[in-house]
Image: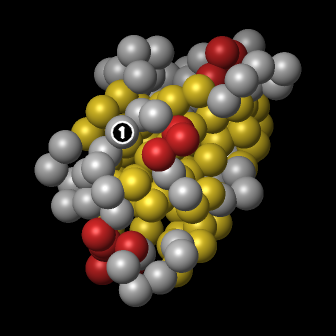
Amino acid sequence: QVQLVESGGGLVQAGDSLRLSCAASGRTFSRYAMGWFRQPPGKERESVAAISWNGGSTYYADSVKGRFTLSRDNSKNAAYLQMNSLKPEDTAVYYCAAGSPVATLAHRLYDSWGQGTQVTVSS
């Protein structure tokens, strides 16, 4: 129902920052919670952050608390993940997700996914 396209990934050095964007299409985008997930090479997909439909509540995985900030702009049908103080362990394909009625870090509760954008952090 909601189509998502991520962008903003790239190759950076440890300590650098990146801002990932997720462009969404769909009339009801603003009614869904939004999540960001990532999959490191050779590992399972893991949670990063989630935000409620109106931005009132946010949740972050312990590994990114204090470094990543999730926001959304419903007027632009977009969500953003600001990543600061990047570490090599942040290297992964990052996915945005939508379709959950509530903000959650459980990836199975989302039914719309983007194709992902690669983030590589070198040391």
Secondary structure at numbered mark 1: loop
Q: Is residue 122 left or right of residue 46?
A: right
Q: Is residue 11 above or below residue 66?
A: below
Quarter holding residue 53: bottom left
Q: Is residue 46 above or below residue 89?
A: below
Which residue: 33% across, 22% down? 66
Q: Residues within 10 Å of mark 1 (few under 14, many from 20)?
A: many
Give the mark count: 1
Q: Is residue 66 left or right of residue 22?
A: left
- Colouring style: secondary structure
Q: Which residue is mark 1?
A: 104
Look at the image and tell me whether residue 6 can be seen.
Answer: no
Q: Percent position (x, y) of residue 90? A: 63, 23
Q: Quadrant of the C terminus?
A: top right
Q: Percent position (x, y) of residue 7? A: 65, 59
Look at the image and tell me whether residue 70 can be seen.
Answer: yes
Quarter holding residue 41: top right
Which residue: 35% across, 21% down? 65
